[in-house]
Amino acid sequence: GAVVSQHPSRVICKSGTSVKIECRSLDFQATTMFWYRQFPKKSLMLMATSNEGSKATYEQGVEKDKFLINHASLTLSTLTVTSAHPEDSSFYICSARRYLGTGDSPLHFGNGTRLTVT
Amino acid sequence: GESVGLHLPTLSVQEGDNSIINCAYSNSASDYFIWYKQESGKGPQFIIDIRSNMDKRQGQRVTVLLNKTVKHLSLQIAATQPGDSAVYFCAENRAYNQGGKLIFGQGTELSVKP
């Protein structure tokens, strides 16, 4: 099946530093990837849509200068949390859609990155 | 804004019983829906999907029902097992011209008692 790999799984950083999270589609090409954020006991909140070769599309209320997204290839998207603050601590999850050519298909998710900012 | 929501935040069932998890959606233009299972510390795992031209779809031990009239979705798990304990989300897929985004509902935490 479609596999999405996310790295790192956990990261602890100090306030003011930047953290990069990688998302890779291992066995398929993904022209579009999606980044979500999840707080404890809460649902997944879509942050942005990452488009290969073009700028990401951010959801309302998400700071594009703080959450930098790069989608340089068909198998890799990165999310960089810049100048991290404790309130950025969260579970970040990426996903990708494997198009089957037969209409809609589900998103496949990575296993998330637990970011803790101290 | 519009969102996909769930009726109950928690559900506790006895092992072997059937589980029913409900979901209400508000975007009548949505035509594709997915159920995901999320275990603690992991990403969502695809369970089953359904398109709006169907009202029922069955998988292995799972069935999804779609009622477009009242914008309601449900997931039925037969013979629930301890390994089914997790949070279940329904997700609504927005049309391509709306970004093809997947919007998640609130989630229901399923606990299976042995």
Image: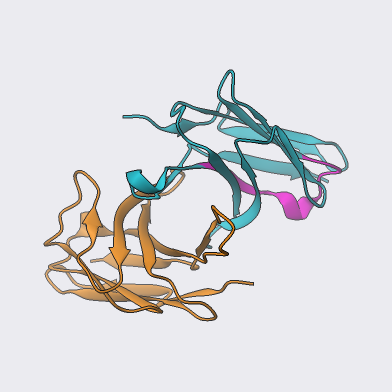
Residue A24 visible to the viewer: yes
How many numbered discs sit on the rendered protein? 0
The x and y percentages for residue A84 are 17, 65
Where B43 falls versus A46 (above or below)?
below
Chain coloured cyan in the rendered structure? B
Give coordinates of residue B8: x percent, y percent. Answer: 58, 28
Whether residue B39 is visible to the viewer of this picture, yes or no, is no
How far across and down, in percent of the image, does residue B35 sit? 61, 46
Identify which residue is drawn at 69% across, 42% down. B111
Q: Determine whether A4 is above or below A67 in the image.
A: below
Q: Is residue A42 left or right of residue B80?
A: left
Q: Quadrant of residue B45?
A: bottom right
Q: Is residue A54 above or below residue A43?
A: below
Does the magenta segment cover residue B99?
Answer: no
Residue in the foreground of this view, choosing between A76 and B111: A76
The N terminus of chain A lies in quadrant: bottom right
Colouring = by chain
Q: Position of residue A51 (x, y in %)?
A: 30, 66
Give B29 or B80, whichever is nearer the viewer: B29
What range of the chain is rendered magenta? B77-91
The quadrant in which residue A27 appears is bottom right
Chain the render paints orange: A
Q: Is residue A86 left or right of residue B90?
A: left
Residue drawn 81% across the image and 49% down it: B81
Quadrant occupied by the C terminus of chain A: bottom left
The outermost residue toward the top is: B70
